[in-house]
Amino acid sequence: MRNALVTALLLSAGTAVADEGQWQPYQMPSIADKLAARDIQIPAEQLADLSQYPMNAVVSLGYCTASFVSPQGLVVTNHHCAYRGIQYNSTKEHNYLADGFLAKSKDKEPSAGPNERLYITESVTNVTDKVNADLSDEPLARYQGIQANRKALIKECEADDNYRCSVRSYHNGLEYYLIKQLIIRDVRLVYAPPESAGSYGGDIDNYEYPRHSADFTFLRAYVGKDGKPAAYSEDNVPYTPKSYLKINKDGVKAGDGVFAAGYPGSTSRYRLTSELEFASNWLYPTFADYYQQRIDTIEAMGNDNADIKIKYAGTMASMANRMKKLNGLLDGFKATDIVGIKQQKEDAFLAWVKENKPEQAEVINNLETLLGEQQLARQTDYFFNNAQASTLLDAAKKLYRLAKEKQKPDAEREQGYQERDMKMFAARLNRIDTSFDASVDKVLWLQNLNAYLAQDKRTPVLDKQLELGQFTDLEAKVDAMYAKTKLADKQTRLDLMNSDVSAFEESNDPFIQLAVALYDTNMAKEKAEKTLSGKLSKARPDYMATIIAYNKANNWPVYPDANGTLRITYGMVDGYQSRDALYKQPFTRLEGIVGKHTGEEPFNAPKKILDAIKAKQYGKHKVESVYEDPRSWICRLFSCLDKPEEFGSVPVNFLSSVDTTGGNSGSPVFNGKGELVGLNFDSTYEAITKDWFFNPTITRAVHVDIRYILWMMDEVDNADNLIAELDLVSNH
């Protein structure tokens, strides 16, 4: 026990070197010393090169991260990231969510769904000067100019239909980068554990630790016989990636340096204190109440109908995750005075500005004013926007907007309605069928309409169209709309993509009529938002330039907030002191699964896993110790016992100090040599507030240990065909 305590103290002390930063790959050489301090041996220049191993094996799913692990296009990601693909193939007769799935040969690998994609980032180019060229000082014109410049760059980049390009804002518009990604359109399901293993502990364990989750799934990328991306076809062949990850079957130990690569979604570390207060006081509590009501409704209806439960499984998992994160943020703000910390830092910044850049004070005051306008508009429009949150009304609005946009030259259309967007537009219309039930949608919409009626920020056009205030039976009105509409039919929706404006304006479909009636009001609100965005597109970058100058003056890290683009973060395998007298060890064991098992969801581990654990069927994946050898440098500093702390099991999940957030789910976790040792899938509850403030002493990410994945494949599911594809390496 003493050895474990010594290790804990040392590892906690090790985080004094803050592992903060979601770094752009090109920045790696500038932090080579920080990487070396964590014993990351792979050259920083190699990590900066997207054409080299391992970065050219890291891919995006559009909402999660994944990576190639075989020369035959095999991809590994989280179970919850592949959830839609598993759900897509699940029926009452073959419920792969409940039972798991393994294709023993490639011809048994089903499509993960027509909307699943893999995006392989091939280049990232700074285009700031081009985006900011010839911009007007008038806010709306400035906004439109930025969008026009972005669209022109995207059009040039997408000369080849096999690529998807985007121009992304970094540092709140201070910089812009053009990102070019190869699109893989045929993605297939290969191997997934049962949900009872893949999300063991469910929402109860979400963002908690210790964890025992088999949060992994294997997919495969397919292309046409010519090697180029193609839509699903039985004639397609596995994609040959430029490289694929080596997998270190020995994993990592406590104190080892690690790094992760992926596509983190969004952080707010450079936002103002007033923005944090708005999120804490209104935005997060409001959204938490909204999601909880929807979760309770869908759960109750799903308990009475198995089809509803399957259809809304992905939606429920996503909302439950958001709810846990929102509650974690709110609890974190209470437990730690993040607002106070933020204000203290902001006060120091403002004092520095007053002394070093006094001309910027007015810029900051102007930004605060604009943010106040933005927050007021969000509160004012909240109930009106929610009152339009019917799946079928949303489809009608988008289809009518498409008909309107088609009247313009393609370059002038709103993004999302250009020719480049039509395949994805159709795919979204298709996807409605997989996660929509009219009975559920009606109840959810009625809840939103009643909430709208219960407040005073009413919009006349909506009141008039739905006869709100005079119609005595709103439920009957809504029932009649769903009974009369044809938009629940997939082919009807797809056919409407080719209809002109007059066809919509003459339609007798109630949802289309409502969409047409709301169009002018929604467009006026959109224009106001764009005008405000135009003002912010000047104020935000000016503020960020000052923040960056301040950070550099203090020798603090300068990296952009997460924005869904490829980043690298580094750290070490490390536990943490979660509260008084409670230190959380960095590794969990198979036996923890048995210890938590109750037989009731979400602690209903599959029998085959329980049987293998009880039989101590560890195979070659057993680990005797996850701590340093007593003869190592640790024990030259501290007095260690002669024998390392015994582990004697297969590691399941582990912690590290890498800096991650949503979107990093599925991110490969590498050892110092760049070999795969785990998959990121979560953060600890105490660390949720890292989206706003990075605290190195408690910020920990949670990973699936590669040894647990290999154990599942080898000892539980006999996935020999997949193991044979992997490039397994050892420390010995």
Image (cartoon, helix red, strand yellow):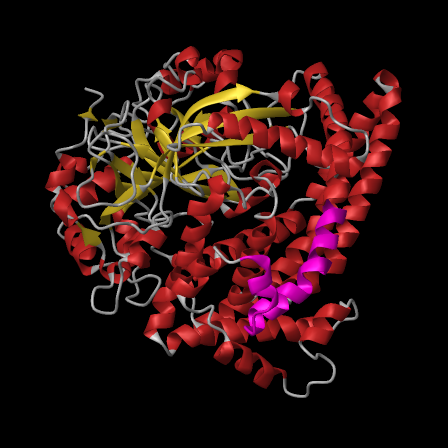
Q: Position of residue 512 (x, y in %)?
A: 57, 67
Q: Where is residue 502 in the image (x, y as percent from the top left)?
A: 59, 62
| Residue 519 lies within the magenta run | yes
Viewed as shown, does residue 487 lie left or right of 189? right
687 versus 469 height, above or below: above
Q: What stretch is highlighted in magenta?
A: 500-529
Dominant SS of magenta comes to helix
Q: Where is residue 351 in the image (x, y as percent from the top left)?
A: 84, 25
Is 664 in front, or is 337? 664
Q: Where is residue 721 in the image (x, y as percent from the top left)?
A: 11, 40
Is 84 in front, or is 291? 84
282 versus 546 height, above or below: below
Viewed as shown, does residue 6 lie left or right of 549? left
Q: In which quarter of the image is the N terminus?
A: top left
Is 314 in front, or is 36? 314
**Residue reaching furthest to the bottom:** 472
Residue at image x 49%, y 58%?
A: 319
| Residue 219 lies within the magenta run | no
Is 388 in front, or is 7? 388
